[in-house]
Amino acid sequence: MTDRVQVLIEGRVQGVGYRFSAYRQALALGLRGWILNLPDGRVEAEFEGAKADLDEMVAWCRRGPHLAKVSEVEVAWETGLERHHHLQIRGD
């Protein structure tokens, strides 16, 4: 069993390096999953790993990189079988 969190991040989060910064942060925490720009301007991500590391990643998502202006983060937690074997940036 593994912990998993899905996040939807709103605000100025595209065109500011959010996905790449989130990727580096998740990689540093040893997380697996994916990060994606959505057509409506939000960023969506799903991360798997240790609960403490996921908590830290969610806290990071609420701040984002220097140029981002995060206005809202929706968080959904799951526990279940491992889905992801690596970390990837999806989309353009």
Image (tube, rainbow, N blue to C red):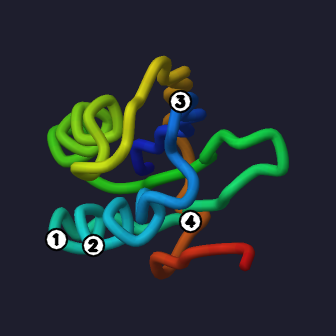
Q: Which mark is residue 11?
A: 3
Mark sitting earlier along the chain (2/4): 2
Mark 3 vs 2, N-terminal side: 3
- For disc 4, the neighbor class at 10 Å (few under 14, some 14 to 19, many from 20) is many
Spatial CA distance of label 3 from label 2 is 20 Å
- Measure the C-alpha gap from mark 2 to mark 4: 12 Å
- What distance separates the C-alpha of mark 1 from that of mark 3? 24 Å
Which residue is disc 4 drawn over? 34
Residue at mark 2: 24
Say whether marks 4 and 1 touch (CB < 8 Å): no
Q: Amino acid at mark 3?
A: Gly
Q: Are marks 1 and 2 in contact (CB under 8 Å)?
A: yes
Q: Nearer the viewer, mark 3 or mark 2?
A: 3
- Tag 2 secondary structure: helix
Relative to 44, does residue 33 appear above or below in the rendering? below
Which percent across, then down, holds residue 53?
19, 48
Q: CA distance from mark 4 to mark 1?
A: 14 Å
Q: Position of residue 72 (x, y in %)?
A: 49, 18
In the image shown, does 10 or 4 lie closer to the viewer?
Answer: 10
Q: Nearer the viewer, residue 51 or 46?
A: 46
Looking at numbered disc 4 in the image, what kind of residue is underneath it? Trp
Determine which quarter of the picture holds residue 83: bottom right
Residue type beneath disc 2: Arg
78 over 14 or under it: above or below = above
The mark found on residue 13 in the picture is none
Q: Which residue is disc 1 drawn over?
A: 28
- Which SS class for mark 3? strand
Q: Secondary structure at mark 4?
A: strand
